[in-house]
Image (spheres, grey):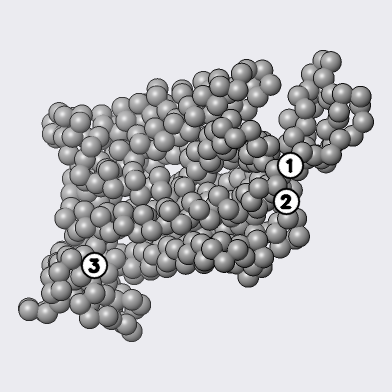
């Protein structure tokens, strides 16, 4: 690997976006989860939903802050490291990012304060409306970001005038050929990652013998989400793959480690192997005959282009995307396995008496985020050597910096990111380890109430028992339903 300024700039962007993409994904999933919890509490009146809402909103708040901070760095890099790209395509990517701020971010910011601090200050209906608006804002944010990224993958609705991209049809720009598939795929990935995180938290507490109605409800809701959404994600992935075959056939060839077709023969599916970009072959290939044709062309003997049909300078790095794709798919298969195992245990009445299942759920906790990163690497590295597919090469987009400057800033990013976001992540894990407690059911604070306000970081403080009107400690009224 030649660590010149171009490669270092790509590594720097990949490093920073790897952090940034994780926090918004959890934000998207948790915001919708909180809306569901509050809606269930308003509908049923069961305290367990309110208890879970107040528990997870603390994790959401910390994660939301880290997502905003990490996103600011991404915007600056377009101007510092990729100035030629910004000059060439800024008339499209700039407005799309501005629309995200003017719609999604302003919507989230407008209602976030009410959501976080308005539980005892506004009515239940208005507070629930605020939670829903924040959840809607996160989905709108994903829509605009994915519209921009999808346009870079499958550009449409533009002309090139004076060596600059000029939009001529904004509907075609936004709803470009790959946009619907990428948006649905990404949002479902966020829901899966959140469900796995919630399920892992429940599994950890059950293994620690913290068996409460709130913990059981967490496990139950997480497993239901996996059961319904994980198989849908597999189907969406199939549609997304066929769309990619149409618009980015070199990416599919690299993902499959497929080099050339034999006339009249079907394409096998290579389960494992080691694609060699220099020798133009896949070593140690373990093939399943006809399955590649069946999956990608939906026919028994269909063919699709091999990497040798593309010029060497136009080929993505098959060695990387071959394995990143298989990591994503392999984890997806394990998610479906966990979902069906939990469904079987629920049917047998042993969901809350299966330590092995809880341990599996705990181990699968980070799998949603790992699969998300692996999928992101697949789609972004698979687009190379283009920054705007078929229109502008990545080498023509980078700013005229030297390797020394980019390398030093990369080292600085690594140090600062691990310090700042590492501390934030540890704090979130401590909140999750603490679990839903009686403190979530405390009566409202303030003058004349049973308790007074405390500092914001008291979220991690020790639980207290609520008081009855005469001042005596009262037992927690928890919901016994499972």
Instruction: Say few, some or many: other residues with alpha carbon within 10 Å of mark 1 (under 14 / 14 to 19 / 20 or more).
Output: some
Residue 298, picture quadrant? bottom left
Q: Percent from the top left, x then y, of residue 153?
A: 25, 47
**Which residue occupies the foreground of this view, 64 or 139?**
139
Question: Of label 3 and label 2, which has the lower sequence position?
Answer: 2
Q: Are marks 1 and 2 in contact (CB under 8 Å)?
A: yes
Please give the label number shown on residue 212.
Answer: 2
x 21%, y 58%: residue: 242
Spatial CA distance of label 1 from label 2 is: 9 Å
Q: Percent from the top left, x then y, of residue 296?
A: 21, 65
Q: Are marks 3 and 1 in contact (CB under 8 Å)?
A: no
* Residue at image mark 3: 295
Q: At numbered mark 3, what does the secondary structure look like: helix, strand or loop?
A: helix
Spatial CA distance of label 3 from label 2 is: 44 Å
* Residue at image mark 1: 478
**Which residue occupies the foreground of this view, 222 or 456?**
222
Instruction: Say few, some or many: other residues with alpha carbon within 10 Å of mark 3 (under 14 / 14 to 19 / 20 or more).
Output: some
Question: Of label 3 and label 1, which has the lower sequence position?
Answer: 3
Question: Of label 1 and label 2, which has the lower sequence position?
Answer: 2
Q: Is residue 128 left or right of residue 165?
A: right
Residue 401, picture quadrant? top left
**Which residue occupies the foreground of this view, 263 or 294?**
294
Q: Percent from the top left, x then y, of residue 230?
A: 42, 57
- Which image quarter holds the N terminus? bottom left
Residue 467, picture quadrant? top right
Q: Nearer the viewer, mark 3 or mark 2?
A: 2
Please give the label number shown on residue 440.
Answer: none
Q: Is residue 78 left or right of residue 310?
A: right
**195 lies above or below 65:** below
x 74%, y 48%: residue: 434
């Amino acid at each position: 690997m030649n660590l010149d300024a171009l490669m270092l700039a790509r590594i720097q962007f990949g490093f920073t976006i790897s952090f940034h993409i994780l926090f918004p994904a959890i934000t998207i999933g948790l915001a919708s989860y909180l809306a569901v919890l509050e809606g269930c509490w308003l509908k049923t009146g069961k305290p367990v939903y309110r208890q879970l809402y107040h528990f997870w909103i603390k994790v959401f708040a910390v994660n939301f802050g880290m997502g905003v901070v990490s996103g600011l760095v991404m915007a600056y890099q377009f101007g510092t490291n990729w100035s030629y790209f910004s000059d060439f395509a800024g008339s499209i990517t700039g407005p799309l990012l501005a629309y995200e701020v003017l719609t999604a971010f302003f919507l989230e910011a407008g209602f976030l304060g009410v959501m976080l601090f308005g539980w005892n200050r506004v009515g239940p209906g208005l507070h629930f409306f605020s939670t829903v608006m924040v959840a809607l804002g996160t989905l709108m944010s994903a829509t605009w970001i994915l519209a921009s990224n999808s346009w870079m993958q499958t550009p449409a609705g533009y002309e090139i005038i004076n060596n600059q991209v000029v939009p001529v049809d904004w509907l075609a720009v936004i709803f470009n050929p790959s946009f619907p598939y990428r948006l649905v795929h990404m949002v479902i990935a966020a829901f899966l990652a959140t469900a796995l995180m919630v399920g892992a938290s429940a599994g950890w507490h059950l293994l620690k013998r913290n068996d409460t109605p709130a913990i059981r409800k967490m496990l139950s809701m997480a497993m239901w989400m996996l059961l319904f959404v994980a198989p849908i994600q597999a189907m969406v992935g199939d549609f997304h793959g066929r769309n990619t075959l149409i618009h980015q056939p070199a990416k599919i060839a690299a993902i499959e480690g497929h080099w050339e077709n034999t006339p009249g023969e079907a394409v096998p599916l290579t389960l494992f192997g080691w694609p060699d970009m220099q020798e133009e072959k896949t070593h140690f290939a373990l093939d399943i005959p006809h399955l590649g044709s069946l999956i990608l062309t939906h026919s028994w003997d269909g063919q699709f282009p091999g990497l040798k049909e593309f010029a060497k300078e136009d080929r993505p790095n098959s060695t990387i995307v071959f394995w990143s794709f298989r990591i994503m798919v392999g984890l997806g298969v394990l998610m479906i396995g966990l979902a069906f195992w939990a469904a079987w245990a629920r049917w047998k009445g042993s969901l809350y008496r299966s330590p092995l299942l809880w341990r599996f759920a705990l181990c699968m906790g980070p799998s949603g985020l790992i699969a998300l990163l692996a999928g992101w690497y697949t789609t972004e590295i698979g687009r190379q050597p283009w920054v705007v597919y078929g229109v502008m090469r990545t080498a023509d987009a980078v700013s005229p910096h030297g390797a020394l400057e980019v390398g030093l800033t990369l080292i600085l990013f690594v140090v600062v990111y691990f310090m700042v976001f590492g501390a934030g992540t540890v704090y979130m894990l401590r909140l999750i380890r603490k679990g839903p407690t009686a403190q979530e059911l405390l009566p409202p604070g303030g003058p004349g109430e049973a308790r007074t306000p405390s500092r914001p970081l008291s979220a991690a403080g020790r639980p207290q028992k609520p008081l009855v009107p005469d001042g005596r400690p009262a037992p927690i009224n928890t919901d016994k339903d499972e």
